[in-house]
Amino acid sequence: MIENLETLVTLSKAGTMMEASTTLRISQSAVSKRIAALERYYDRELIERHGRRVVLTHHGTRLVERVTPLLSELRSVFLEDNALRKGKIILGVSEAILASWGSTLFSKVNDSMPGVEFEFHAQRSPVVLDRLRSGEYMVGICTGSPDAESDLVSEVLRQEPMVIIPSGLASLKYRTGDPLDVITIESRSGAWGSIEENMQRLNLRRVASLESFFAVAQMALAGFGHGLVPVGVAKTLGVPEKQRVLLSEAGLTRPVRFVARKSMFSQTLVRTFYREVSDLASKVRD
């Protein structure tokens, strides 16, 4: 029954059987069978099909609203009772962080906490936050405004500078405040909300957007326009320091945050992990 309810909740977010099956790592027929089993049990239609899209009926919506907090608590209990007891930390990390300076940082954390097992999941920041709330992850390292999630504990680990990668690495004569068209991250990302205001202040105009900072950087390197990315992305791709336009002195950075549910953050193992990550993140060189 729990698997069936989790499937309905996932389907309500995904919107299609295909996306739900991908998220759950089961077949589309298995998704359909689980939903059908719920409908038989409750003797109610829970979903309606509109082409490939699936929407919840009134009864489906009410059921999802009621069971979502319960499923989150069940997952949280599982993590606290099993993962913590075994000395394991399950964490979601922003893809751009894990693919740049994050992997080196976590290697050092691993060395300083040899008895702890780490399970990493690379996701976009909004997904990390969703899975923290649902009880799937214990800890998140992601980006975005530190005040955006009042239901979670959120501590800023560092302010990562943003840089401009000149289109095709051609010479760019840029002075802070000059109008400049750039390619950067799209609006649904965690980082966008924390950089948008300062971009406007600096007259940086987003003329194109992509879902990945690494994709932005690669397009800039290929000559499709100037790319606005975190410095860690530029360094990882080998962009020479002299050809990056550093914007931290102008106040354009993205906050990197340590996020957890309040009950999880109070656990000794998680607080120890937070102290180690916070200490090492403050020493990351830009």
Image (cartoon, rainbow, N blue to C red):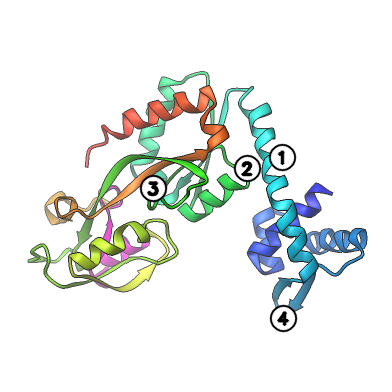
Mark 1 or 3, nearer chain start: 1
Residue 273 lies in what quarter of the image? top left
Q: Secondary structure at mark 2?
A: loop
Residue at the image position 80 percent from the left and 54 percent from the top:
4
Mark 4 lies on residue:
51
Q: Are marks 1 and 2 in contact (CB under 8 Å)?
A: yes
In the displayed structure, would residue 207 be above or below residue 144?
below
Mark 3 or 4, nearer chain start: 4
Residue at the image position 68 percent from the left and 66 percent from the top:
18
Q: Is residue 113 left or right of residue 132?
A: left
Q: Are marks 1 and 4 in contact (CB under 8 Å)?
A: no
Where in the figure is residue 123, as x and y percent of width and height?
50, 51
- Identity, as a three-letter code, of the amino acid under mark 1: Leu
Alpha carbons under labels 3 and 4: distance apart: 39 Å
Span highlighted in magenta in the image: 214-233
Where in the figure is residue 63, as x and y percent of width and height?
77, 59
Q: Are marks 2 and 3 in contact (CB under 8 Å)?
A: no
Label 4 packing within 10 angstroms: few (<14), some (14-19), many (20+): few
Most extreme residue toward the top is 115
Mark 1 or 4, nearer chain start: 4
Query: Is 55 within the magenta?
Result: no
Mark 2 or 3, nearer chain start: 2
Mark 2 lies on residue:
135
Residue 245 lies in what quarter of the image? bottom left
Alpha carbons under labels 1 and 3: distance apart: 27 Å
Mark 4 or 2, nearer chain start: 4
Alpha carbons under labels 4 and 2: distance apart: 32 Å
